[in-house]
Amino acid sequence: MSQKADSKREWPLWEVFIRSKAGLDHKHAGSLHAADADMAIENARDVYTRRMEGISIWVVESKYIHASDPGDAEILYEPANDKIYRHPTFYNLPDELTHM
Amino acid sequence: MSKELIKYTLQIADNALVIGHRLSEWCGHGPVLEQDIAITNMALDHLGQARNLYQYAASLFNELAPDEQMQLFASTALQNKVAEGKPIDEDDLAYLRDSWDFYNTMLVEMPNNDWAYTIARSFIYDTYNHLFYTKLLSSADESLAAIAEKSLKEVDYHMRWSSEWVIRLGDGTEESTRRMQATINDLWAYSGELMIMNDTDKWALQHNIGTDLEQIRADWKLRTSAVLNEATLQIPADGWMHTGGKNGRHTEHLGYVLAELQFMQRAYPGMAW
């Protein structure tokens, strides 16, 4: 009986991060199931990079991701609302400077 | 010269088409979503390789004199096309030949049965295919060498994927070990044909187009043994091996593959998307 339950047990969930090109950050692409890290990377390759989306893959088991509590949103994020001086928008940029 | 080269090219192409079709049968039926996508990706890799090879074979075929074209294939659908004086293309080679004009090995036409069986079949084929394409890189035929170069990265991944699955299942639970061992034992007698030289292989070797398959056999044995050892599986004894597919004599399974693969083009000739 327990063996039967085992065989129905799903593989653990993994979060997948893809770097689309050199110099850019790894971005969260989605999640998938895999038995271990090697399989997770191969699955990620097949599921998330089929259309040339990436050149590097990170995977991390979802249980190791710790998330902030949505209920804390007011305390955590709203205080930043009126702190416009934290944005570097008060400088005049030279015209030659692009990609800013 | 061209007739032998066409047959040699078709031996490679038909392996790719038939195993690609077999893998595509998993589409929507994979054991988990991720592996469903993985195996259909690989089906498309094989199909892409088959297309390159068929395009090349078709261009060689179109250069033959009409009477030579007539003799090359027994299927009337293809002969009718020749009689009309039209050039053939990759689709004609895939859809209009009958099983006796197909030159794939019998291994690749074996049915999927279950995941272990599908994995074992791919493992045997992918290991061979990687060694074969590596040798084909130095073929005197530039087109085949170029196709080999393009295909090799895909084939490298296929081999890694199927080897890892053999290890996973072989060194897994009591049931997975037993079932993996059973399929390896079952399919072993179909592994030999990949590396037994028929007349076409010998012709290709003489002209520096092909490669010595006997040499590949030694490397194939080393690689498969290493994986089977890691998978805690027994390596079957090399006994009698099935042959015939490369000369157009197939198991009954190929007929079913072709019936499904070719139905639309046979029922509605020239039909397009």
Image: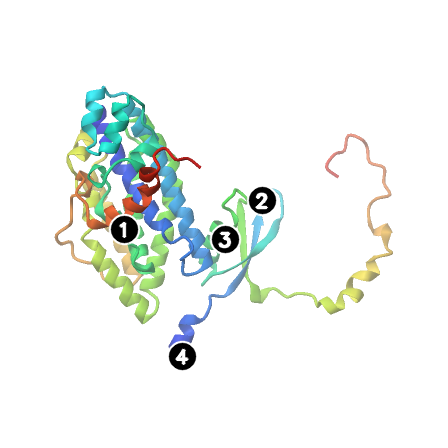
Disc on the earlier residue, 2 or 3: 2
Q: Separation of disc 1 and disc 3 at Cα?
A: 25 Å
Q: Separation of disc 4 and disc 3 at Cα?
A: 31 Å
Residue of label 3:
A44
Residue of label 4:
A2
Foreground label between 4 and 2: 4
The residue type indicated by label 4 comes to: Ser
Residue B22 relative to residue A67: left or right: left
State the residue in front, B59 or B34: B59
Residue of label 2:
A20
The part of the image, by quadrant, that contains residue B185 is: bottom left
Query: Is disc 1 in the same subunit as disc 2?
Result: no
List the single residue furthest toward the bottom.
A1
Tell me the element at label 4. helix
Subunit bearing disc 3: A
Residue of label 1:
B124
The residue type indicated by label 3 comes to: Ala
Tell me the element at label 3. helix
Tell me the element at label 1. helix
Q: Separation of disc 4 and disc 2 at Cα?
A: 43 Å
The part of the image, by quadrant, that contains residue A97 is: top right
Query: Is disc 1 in the same subunit as disc 4?
Result: no
Contact (CB < 8 A) between labels 4 and 2? no
